Image (tube, rainbow, N blue to C red):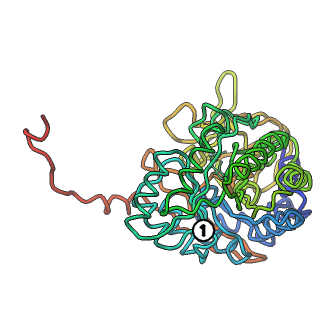
Amino acid sequence: MAEHAIALVAAAGAETGSNQLVYRDQTLQMEGVCIDTIAGAVPTPFYCYSSDAIRTAYLTLSAALKPIGASVCFAVKANGNLSVLGLLAALGSGMDIVSGGELERAESAGVPASKIIFSGVGKKRSEIASALEVGIHQLNVESEAELDAVIEVAGALGVRAPVALRVNPDVDAGTHAKISTGKKHDKFGISFEDIPALYAKALAAPELDPVGLAVHIGSQILDLSPYRSAYSRIADLVRSLRSQGLPVRRLDLGGGIGIPYDHGSSPDLGEYAKIVGETVGGLDCELTVEPGRWLVGPAGILVAEVLYIKETADRLTAIVDAGMNDLMRPAMYGAVHPVFPLKQVRQGSHTYQIAGPVCESSDIFGTYSDLAPLRSGDRLAFGCAGAYGASMASTYNARDLAAEVLVDGDRFRVIRRRQTTKALLTLEEETEWHGSPSTLR
Ligand SMILES: Cc1ncc(COP(=O)(O)O)c(C=O)c1O
Ligand SMILES: N[C@@H](CCCC[NH3+])C(=O)O
């Protein structure tokens, strides 16, 4: 399993050809650092990211997109750690955000507002205001009601808001139902038929500068053909809007490129660029993509310790000290992350169910065959955990948030300390009661 998992992680690192996670002397290393050394200094569970993997992924993607002139806005939701954002910002990446909190993070990491796009179906007026005040590059609007809110907020601030309308192209991205965003009944985007009237409304509003269209059909997309369908529909829409005298100068093509977690290979970036070129390339629009997972997913692992081996009639279960609160993807989407021991010290091949300590039956990482015998105290790494891992973590069961560590060459540093539930306890101050029998009626 271990070799297989490493191959998967390396494959997920994809076209990069780099080898950020390898066994040397039967010990797992990230770049030049032995993970077990980190585990000696940082309590498990913790996340660990490879700077080199992130850099290489960014440069590989930028190079693939160069022929079509598309710029990259990293989707902060995939990994909002300030050091990770800082690394990407230093390489020139813009950011795609979905909340006021992510705006603050992107700005703190040094990303200029002129490179930030604000997506999401539920922006509060206060968040729209903050974005306009800092001079955001673009607000992607997802409904007429939201368009009205932007008009209202921009009017009050006396600014002209750059807006793109997010189109729901009614295309099946062929991904997990919980991460599909471009089908008619998904909550995202404005239906195709409603776009022309709304675009005309935006153009007529002095508070708005309608800059173009946005589309994002879903996440963890391994087969690229849905992109062709979606982008072709967008191209038709651009031509139709222009024929009605509605100018379109920017296209935000969304993110979604998948990575192989347990099988298969990463989509071919050259093929993706070709699809973009052939569908929307000739429209003379500024193009942007918003990848999250592809840039950081393969770069991260979650390190855990085996607490107990539990033997029951039909299975062996390894209970580890990481749970669904640390890595929610297996419980939420049935995702399988590759697993491999930090040390290859034993021979043999066993099947283990790996479970966390959280009081939920869904706190299971999966059933892994072909693992060498495990013992209490062994440490394991879950691969491909750099995206939607720490960023989706919670303190459920009053568990501490896992620390995050960044490796760079032969050095590492803790980039987010464990957030202890003890610290949270001191923040939960008592405040006075509101309401009275009359207000409660
Ligand atoms: C609007 C938008 N852009 C970009 C992304 C990033 O997606 P991914 O991490 O799959 O590239 C998402 C997440 O699905 C999204 O909702
Ligand atoms: N959280 C999802 C991706 C959702 C992307 C945002 N729309 C995952 O872990 O796969």
Query: Is the shortest distance between ligand 1 and the CB of mark 1 under 8 Å?
Result: no
Q: Which image quadrant is residue 13 in?
A: bottom right
Q: Which image quadrant is residue 315 in?
A: top right
Q: Is residue 45 visible?
A: no
Residue ID at (82%, 43%) = 222
Residue ID at (54%, 42%) = 357
Residue ID at (25%, 60%) = 429
x and y percentages locating residue 172 in the rendered image: 74, 34
Q: Secondary structure at mark 1?
A: loop
Q: Is residue 338 visible?
A: yes
Residue 18 against residue 332 in the figure, above or below: below
Which quadrant holds the C terminus?
top left
Left or right for 363, reference 219:
left
Q: Which image quadrant is residue 10 in?
A: bottom right
Location of mark 1 (residue): 137
x and y percentages locating residue 395 in the rendered image: 46, 51
* Number of on-image labels: 1
Q: Relative to the observer, which residue lies in front, 218 or 145? A: 145
x and y percentages locating residue 424 in the rendered image: 37, 59
Q: Relative to the observer, which residue lies in front, 36 or 74? A: 74
Give the residue type at disc 1.
Answer: His
Residue closest to the far top: 313
